[in-house]
């Protein structure tokens, strides 16, 4: 019988499969190219979805984020503070996210390892634990995990769509 942890890990692994396939199939020189004026780039979408997974899950489990603890912030060299994760960014900010497929994959894989380790510990009894009291009502672990995984699936879908536009024809 599948557990809550199994379901969460399966969702995360499906995002990883899509990220890997997308980064393998999209020409490197097109990753930071918007599919249309004002649209998010594949590089920004992958970076953003990874930053959200990294910060939301690390915070919920009181762990260090891979972005800074594993050196990805320095490696990417983006013109943003280490706390940036994409919310509220301008189009110019989106265009500033330039990274190789190897770096995007590496950061995603480091985050995947952190998130998978945390998700592997989730029990049904823990789902009602409050992880963020800054909201009304306070955010539970269940809500935070569903939110983070939903965000990841939406953004990897958007990245796939953008890559399809860039590489068609």
Image (cartoon, grey):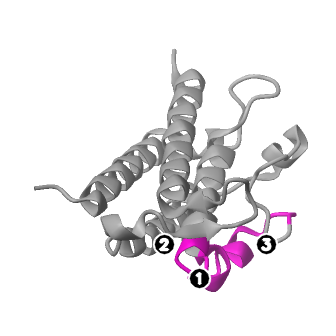
Label 2 SS: helix
Give the farthest residue toward the left. Answer: 1
Question: Contact, CB < 8 Å: mark 1 with mark 2?
Answer: yes
Which label sits on residue 82? 3
Residue beneath the point at 29% across and 63% down: 5
N-terminal of the two: label 1 or label 2?
1
In which quadrant is the N terminus drawn? Answer: bottom left
Q: Residues within 10 Å of mark 3 (few under 14, many from 20)?
A: few
Q: Residues within 10 Å of mark 2 (few under 14, many from 20)?
A: some
Which label sits on residue 89? none
For label 1, the residue is 70
Question: Contact, CB < 8 Å: mark 3 with mark 1?
Answer: no
Which label sits on residue 110? 2
Residue beneath the point at 50% across and 63% down: 141
Is residue 115 positioned above or below 74 on the image?
A: above
Residue beneath the point at 61% across and 59% down: 139
Residue 37 percent across, percent down from the top left: 81, 24
Instruction: Using residue 21 as the reference point, say whether residue 48 is left or right of it.
Output: right
Is residue 139 positioned above or below 151 on the image?
A: below
Instruction: Using residue 112 as the reference point, say whether residue 163 is left or right of it.
Output: right
Q: Quadrant of residue 99?
A: bottom right
Label 1 SS: loop
Label 3 SS: loop
N-terminal of the two: label 3 or label 2?
3
Q: Nearer the viewer, residue 131 or 55?
A: 131
Q: Which residues are magenta?
A: 59-80
Question: Contact, CB < 8 Å: mark 3 with mark 2?
Answer: no
Residue 67 percent across, percent down from the top left: 64, 73
Quote the CA–CA distance across marks 3 and 1: 12 Å
Instruction: Using residue 99 as the reference point, say whether residue 8 is left or right of it.
Output: left
Quote the CA–CA distance across marks 3 and 2: 16 Å
Quote the CA–CA distance across marks 1 and 2: 8 Å
């Amino acid at each position: 019988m599948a557990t809550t942890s199994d379901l969460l890990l399966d969702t995360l692994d499906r995002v990883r499969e899509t990220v890997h396939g997308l980064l393998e199939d999209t020409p490197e020189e097109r990753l930071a190219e918007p599919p249309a004026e004002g649209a998010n780039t594949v590089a920004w979408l992958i970076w953003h979805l990874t930053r959200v997974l990294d910060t939301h899950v690390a915070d919920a489990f009181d762990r260090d984020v891979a972005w800074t603890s594993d050196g990805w912030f320095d490696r990417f060299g983006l013109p943003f503070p280490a706390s940036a994760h994409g919310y509220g960014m301008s189009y110019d900010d989106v265009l500033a996210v330039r990274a190789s497929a190897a770096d995007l994959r590496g950061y995603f894989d480091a985050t995947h390892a952190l998130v998978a380790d945390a998700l592997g510990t989730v029990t049904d009894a823990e789902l009602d634990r409050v992880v963020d009291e800054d909201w009304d009502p306070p955010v539970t672990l269940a809500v935070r995990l569903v939110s983070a995984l939903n965000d990841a699936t939406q953004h990897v879908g958007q990245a796939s769509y953008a890559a399809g536009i860039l590489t068609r024809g």
